[in-house]
Image (cartoon, helix red, strand yellow):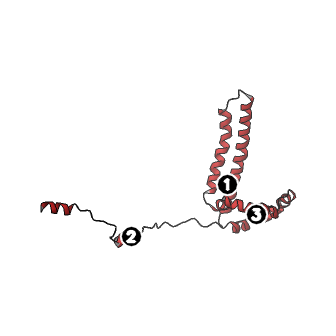
Amino acid sequence: MAAKSIYSSLTVHSMANKKPSPTATRTITSKKSTATPQVKLLTRVEQLKLLTKAEKAGLLSLAEKSGFSLSTIERLGLLTKAEEFGVLSAATNPETPGTLFTLSLFLLLLGPVCAFVVPEDYSWEVVVQLAVALLSVLGGSAAFAASGFVSNLQKSD
């Protein structure tokens, strides 16, 4: 008798057939609101009159003279490639200007650091210093300009 009562107290009951209680099936949701407004890229381009400014600066005719027209863009599928690489979504991402600014600072500091760290014992080392300095200045300046441009595009008036 004692063995039977010990055996029944050690029995493991299966939970597979039991239904969970209603409180266990509730999902917890976050009540955080997204305070970041949607960026309306084309509306912002229109507000800034970027196409008019490009036309007045002669950029469109210069691009056309160099063989870069809308039909060329369409034929090469550049808009599709830009979409695949996430260029358009990056332009609307609120983190992009900060990321580009950080990249520009890194690149602009890379040139002087390379000139300080790389010795000047051989001519190829001087060429490396010059190449890194040139690329860091060009890349850092481009990233800084892109950061300001994307930030300006994302502003809402």
**Label 1's element?**
helix
**Kind of residue at badge 3:** Leu
Task: Classify 10 Å Cα crowding around label 1: few (below 14), some (14-19), many (20 and above).
Answer: many
Name the disc covering residue 25, or none.
2
Q: Earlier in the sequence, mark 1 or mark 2?
A: 2
Q: Tags 3 and 2 in contact by the CB under 8 Å rule?
A: no
Mark seen at residue 52: none
Between 5 and 65, the residue placed more toward the observer is 5
Which mark identifies residue 50? 3
Q: Quadrant of the N terminus?
A: bottom left
Amino acid carrying mark 2 in the image: Thr
Under mark 1, the amino acid is: Ser
Q: Is residue 18 left or right of residue 111?
A: left
Horizontally, residue 60 falls left or right of residue 7, namely right
Front-most of 86 and 143? Answer: 86
User: According to the image, label 1 marks what residue?
Assistant: 147
At x 39%, y 70%, the residue is: 25
Q: Quadrant of residue 119?
A: top right
Q: Between residue 132 and residue 4, name the one nearer to us.
A: 4
Q: Which element is circle 3 on?
A: helix
Disc 3 to disc 2, how far (Cα)? Answer: 53 Å
Q: Position of residue 48 (x, y in %)?
A: 73, 65
